[in-house]
Image (cartoon, helix red, strand yellow):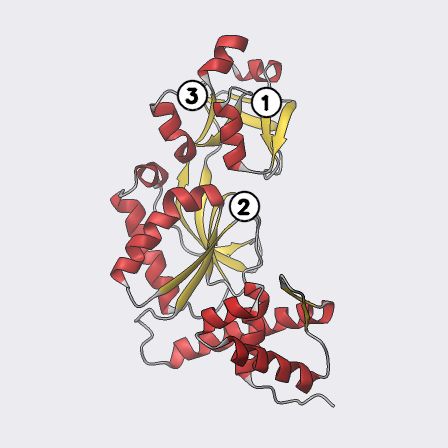
């Protein structure tokens, strides 16, 4: 029969292998030898009398049972880390590894420079950044927090609003020379639109004129993509018109590669949030990073970040991850 008492080191080794995709990477992450990690996982499988991993020459993947067991392990390990942080005596001193995720565009433009400064201030800290435009389960993935942009839905996670950003309609000069420049939102359906499928409603846009007049238009997509980097590349190549956050367009507009359209109209502003599990206690490393990141935006050490911070931080609230 499977043992009811499982060594937590074995759970940590198993979780690290699932997250890393290999025994070698897991060993580097844990500071152990590959043989030791393999031994921990093998003993865990023996104790549970079940196969948790499928091993191939290229990658290690969890079995169906292993994937379900990993989700439970992640919660156990996260609760354990929180418990240690609460009673460790050094609750105000950040330590260990900060595991966070951010969108690829915002991550590269703002989060990466902030992390560099954070590591300068806390050289003993380690950081794992997962850059992805997909929404990740923070608890199952054992993430400490996520920096997310856009609009959030209600859920059991918590968020702190750090600021907001403008959305800009733009196109390349080559496109405008060939197809003309839209003067009103009503002109947009006549143009070639590049749609980003990451949005809930990529073809419907609500504009507000500087006088306060509201106007909603629906466009038809000539090109679709699931990547903001690809969307910007399409725009720069003169493929069509689209919308991106201002922090992604500033350099292109400044250097003439893209032109801002409809300057008298604005779109709803997107928010910048720090999202984290709804635990009673927030770890010192998360608090330290949030304080540093908020100050980083306030100081304006990055030109894009300066334009992002246009609202004061709001209290944490329940949101959807």
- Label number found at residue 64: none
Q: Nearer the viewer, residue 90 or 57?
A: 57
Residue 74 at x, y = what percent? 57, 70
Neighbour tally class for label 1: few under 14, some 14-19, many 20 plus, Cα within 10 Å = many
Of the numbered discs 3 and 2, the one sitting upstream in the chain is 2
In the rendered image of this protein, does residue 275 appear above or below residue 269?
below
In the rendered image of this protein, does residue 33 appear above or below residue 181?
below
Residue 319 at x, y = what percent? 53, 53
CA gap, disc 1 and disc 3: 15 Å
CA gap, disc 3 and disc 2: 24 Å
Q: Nearer the viewer, residue 157 or 34?
A: 34
Q: Nearer the viewer, residue 221 or 116?
A: 116
- Label number found at residue 193: 1
CA gap, disc 1 and disc 2: 21 Å
Q: Which image quarter holds the N terminus?
A: bottom right
Neighbour tally class for label 2: few under 14, some 14-19, many 20 plus, Cα within 10 Å = some
The residue shown at (34%, 23%) is: 255
In the rendered image of this protein, does residue 36 appear above or below residue 178?
below
Of the numbered discs 1 and 2, the one sitting upstream in the chain is 2
Q: Nearer the viewer, mark 3 or mark 2?
A: 2
Residue at the spot of label 3: 260
Does residue 207 appear in the picture of this structure?
A: no
Q: Is residue 128 left or right of residue 312?
A: right
Q: In the structure shown, which secondary structural element does the residue marked by tag 3 occupy?
A: strand
Residue 21 at x, y = what percent? 58, 63
Residue at the spot of label 2: 133
């Amino acid at each position: 029969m499977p043992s009811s008492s499982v060594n937590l080191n074995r759970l940590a080794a198993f979780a690290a292998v699932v997250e890393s995709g290999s025994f070698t990477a897991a060993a580097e992450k844990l500071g152990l030898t590959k043989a030791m990690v393999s031994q921990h996982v093998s003993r865990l499988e023996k104790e549970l009398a079940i196969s948790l991993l499928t091993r191939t020459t290229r990658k290690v993947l969890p079995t169906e049972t292993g994937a379900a067991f990993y989700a439970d392990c992640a919660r156990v390990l996260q609760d354990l880390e929180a418990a240690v942080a609460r009673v460790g005596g050094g609750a105000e001193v950040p330590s260990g590894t900060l595991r966070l995720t951010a969108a690829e565009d915002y991550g590269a433009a703002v989060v990466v420079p902030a992390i560099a400064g954070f590591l300068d201030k806390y050289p003993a800290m380690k950081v794992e950044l997962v850059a992805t435009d997909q929404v990740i389960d923070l608890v199952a993935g054992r993430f400490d927090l996520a920096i997310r942009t856009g609009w959030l839905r209600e859920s059991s996670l918590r968020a702190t609003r750090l600021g907001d950003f403008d959305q800009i309609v733009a196109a390349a000069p080559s496109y405008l020379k060939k197809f003309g420049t839209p003067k009103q939102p009503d002109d947009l359906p006549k143009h070639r639109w590049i749609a980003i499928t990451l949005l809930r409603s990529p073809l419907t846009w609500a504009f507000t004129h500087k006088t306060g007049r509201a106007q909603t238009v629906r466009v038809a997509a000539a090109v679709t993509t699931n990547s903001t980097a690809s969307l910007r590349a399409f725009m720069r190549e003169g493929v069509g018109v689209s919308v991106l956050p201002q922090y992604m367009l500033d350099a292109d507009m400044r250097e003439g590669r893209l032109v801002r359209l409809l300057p008298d109209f604005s779109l709803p502003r997107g928010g910048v949030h720090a999202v984290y599990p709804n635990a009673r206690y927030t770890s010192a490393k998360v608090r330290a990073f949030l304080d540093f990141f908020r100050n980083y935006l306030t100081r304006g050490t990055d030109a894009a970040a300066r334009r992002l911070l246009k609202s004061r931080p709001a209290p944490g609230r329940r949101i959807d991850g």
